[in-house]
Image (tube, helix red, strand yellow):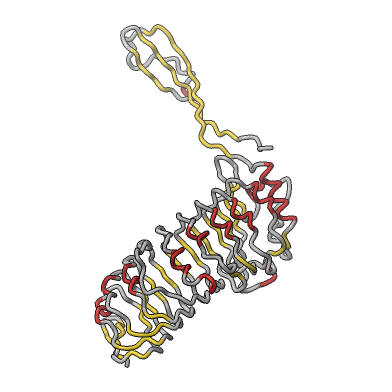
Amino acid sequence: MVQPTTFYILYSYIHVLRCAACSQLVIRSPKSMGDTRSPSHSSLSCSCLVSVLFLTLVTTTRGCMKAERDALLAFKAGILDPSRRLSSWHRPVDCCRWSGVVCDNTTGHVVQLNLQNAEAYYDNSTVLGGEIGPSLLSLTHLRRLNLTQNDFGGARIPKFLGSFGRLRYLDLSYSNFGGAIPPQLGNLSTLRYLSLSSYNLMIDAGDDLQWLARLSSLTFLQMNFVNLSTASPDWLRAVNQLPSLQQLYLSGCGLTALPDSLSRVNLTALTTLDLRGNFFNSTFPSWLFELRSLSYLAISNSELYGTVPAGFGNLTRLAQLDLSGNSLSGSIPVDLWSLASLTTLDLSHNSFTSPFYLKSGTRQVCRS
């Protein structure tokens, strides 16, 4: 049952004087209602006096929906909460006031569930665990779900999470989910932020990540340390179908292929690309020079070899570049030094034959 709506009402009395010769509107406050003196234009003969009460709705406040409150309580029943982080979750407290729950001020629907563990680095006893039950499906207006830094004991990501039609933000990173990522997540067509970083997640053999390509609204994708080894070389084909993507983090994913070219590059909005710690065994790909919005590029310790082609002059927004720990050789492209926005450069632990220069303020330091 929805709690009664609370109305805050601003009211004023307005005297309307309709006169024979013309019409005049005189506004009086309630304090002056006892004043019977004529208006300043006393020569006007008035035929009638009407008092009108205007009621103006200033704001409304709703409590949460009963069905959604019951769904949250059913969810809590399956959760292990040793530090009592969910202690506020009980009747008769309005569920919109519960810890981690955010409701829409107008409709009262639950729109956010923020149960991330901010203390994970300092106190492991504050993690949530247990089972994520399907009762959450009653939260049909949910737009944000954050469960990062908890511990669900290697449980699989529930397939039903792909049924939240309005979800825009999903963060399940470093919460000890295990097994294969369910391709049903590809049904989240409104999703803009997806973080699944984990040391225990993988994809099924034969999964070409086309479920990922269906997330056409995605702007942020983080899957660090997820085992994507069986997706090579399909991973790039899938990611390249995300034209809105701005940040991509696939560090330590066991990727074994980095194609040298793409027939068409759709990642024109990409500002951050992190591919560190993979096993590409590839040359430096020329299609990277078409990512003209890039400000951060890191492909360190990823078994790149051969020479680096010219083309950095196209990346005019590049501020940080890390190619360290590879087997790159030959001369460093001259156009790299023309990048005025470049502030951080790491080319160490390669086999370049020419010296390189690092800018430090107005000073250039030459290192061989």
- Identify which residue, 259 or 160, lies in the foreground: 259
Q: Is residue 314 left or right of residue 327?
A: left
Residue 35: x percent and y percent?
A: 45, 18
Quick check: 97 above or below 355?
above
Left or right? Give the position of 250 relative to 262. Answer: right
Residue 338: image location, x then y, percent: 24, 77
Is residue 321 depicted above or below 191 in this figure?
A: below
Q: Nearer the viewer, residue 353 or 358?
A: 353
Tell me if I can see residue 88 in this picture. Answer: no
Place of residue 205 in the rendered image (x, y in percent of width and height, measured from the top left) = 58, 69
- Dividing the picture into quadrants, the one containing residue 200 is bottom right
User: Quick check: 140 left or right of 285?
Assistant: right
Identity of the residue drawn at 65% across and 35% down: 4
Residue nearest the viewer, comparing 368 with 364: 368
Quadrant in which the N terminus is drawn? top right
Please tell me which residue is depicted at 44% across the width and 83% down the height of the picture: 303
Is residue 315 visible from the viewing direction of this image?
A: yes
